[in-house]
Amino acid sequence: MEVMERDAFTGKIIGCAIEVHRALGPGLLESTYQHCLAHELHLNGISFRLEHPVPVHYKGMQLDCGYRLDVLVDNQLVVELKAIDQVREIHRAQLLTYIKLAGIDTGLLINFNVEKLAEGIERFKL
């Protein structure tokens, strides 16, 4: 996939998240935003999976440790959702680890606990 297509693709996902934030605003639980974003993705015909399991591979061994991606979109984008006061480096590191484990090169970190959602969105590309 070319960079321009990828930007248009992530732009669609961001648009869905903005729609959810416009309707609900900040202050709710992460799980609420997750299910409403899933509904918005569905309404827009975008393929996704919630709580997609990701195993850890270590020296020929597979560990099913219970890691789950908040939202896996079209098998090409990991979306990590937050509803927190401030995004910290550990949250960014978590997303980077998830996209590496999933073998995907692009991720979005979306924090819904902000006044304007644009302030709560970060894109990552390996």
Image: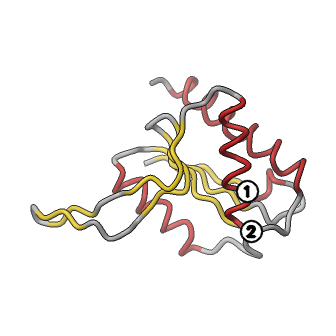
Amino acid type of disc 2? Leu
Which numbered dot is residue 21? none
The residue lying at 65 percent from left, 54 percent from top is 122
Relative image position of residue 4 (x, y in whole percent):
58, 24
Amino acid type of disc 1? Tyr
The residue lying at 63 percent from left, 59 percent from top is 81
Displayed quadrant of residue 13: top right
The residue lying at 32 percent from left, 71 percent from top is 65
Which numbered dot is residue 29? 2
Q: What residue would you read off at disc 1?
A: 33
Relative image position of residue 77 (x, y in whole percent):
50, 42
Q: Secondary structure at mark 1?
A: helix
With 81 as the anchor, is 62 left or right in this view?
A: left
Q: Secondary structure at mark 2?
A: loop
The residue lying at 67 percent from left, 55 percent from top is 34
Residues under numbered marks 2 and 1 in contact, where contact means CB atoms less than 8 Å apart: yes
Badge 2: residue crowd in 10 Å (few <14, some 14–19, many ≥20): few
The image's colour scheme reads secondary structure
